[in-house]
Image (tube, grey):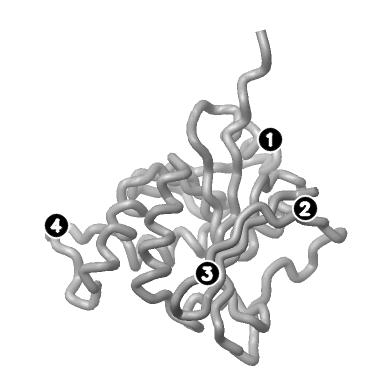
Amino acid sequence: MGEQPVRPLRYSINVTLDGCCDHQVGIADEESHRYWAAQLERADALLFGRVTYGMMEAAWRLPATGTWPQWMADWMIPFAQAIDGMKKYVVSGTLDQVDWNAELVQGDLGKAVQQLKQEPGKGLFVGGVTLPLALADLGLIDEYEFVVLPVLAGHGPTLFAGLSERLELRLVGRQEFRSGAVALRYQPS
């Protein structure tokens, strides 16, 4: 009897041509929102650090009224519904509790994430900046996905600042958008 396959951990983020990953730069358009909503179908859970969890909850949690906010365009709703309904794991040493279909992950990060990867399922998505850096250093990310936006931000933050050692990746997927953005998927070599 063979080993149970590992649930892959995929890191996904929007980034500008000059490497900026500030979520307010190069705001996602309808095409990229639809792309990300479809990509979420490749996972059954999300892994966030405290900051990304708070940011995502503020934007994509269905309000208690049961009605999406007026600022949200109709084409954003499938993405919002996907994020809102998914299981979430939140890595934090400072939070005492989480809700929004979430569970705290505390203690040894490597062991905790390995355990999540061993659970049955389609995959885990991780977002943000700080947590993915730690996971990359531990060699736990199975796929990196960057939607490169045709924008020069001229400032940071940038991805993987402080990575402990160089990581070689191989291209496994590419998709071009009408906007000029390009989705690039890589796996460690």
Is mark 1 in CB contact (under 8 Å) with mark 4? Answer: no
Residue found 43% across the figure and 60% down from its top: 36
What type is the residue that disc 1 sits on? Answer: Lys
Residue 83 sits in quarter: bottom left
Q: CA separation, marks 3 and 1?
A: 37 Å
The image shows residue 116 at horizontal and vertical percentages of: 57, 34
Q: Earlier in the sequence, mark 4 or mark 3?
A: 4
Q: CA separation, marks 4 and 2?
A: 40 Å
Q: Mark 2, mark 1: which one is toward the viewer?
A: 2
Q: CA separation, marks 2 and 3?
A: 29 Å
Residue found farthest to the top: 1
Circle number at residue 111: 1
Q: CA separation, marks 2 and 1?
A: 14 Å
Label 2 belongs to which residue?
A: 137
> Where, quadrant-wise, is the N terminus in this rendering?
top right
Label 4 belongs to which residue?
A: 66
Q: Earlier in the sequence, mark 2 or mark 3?
A: 2
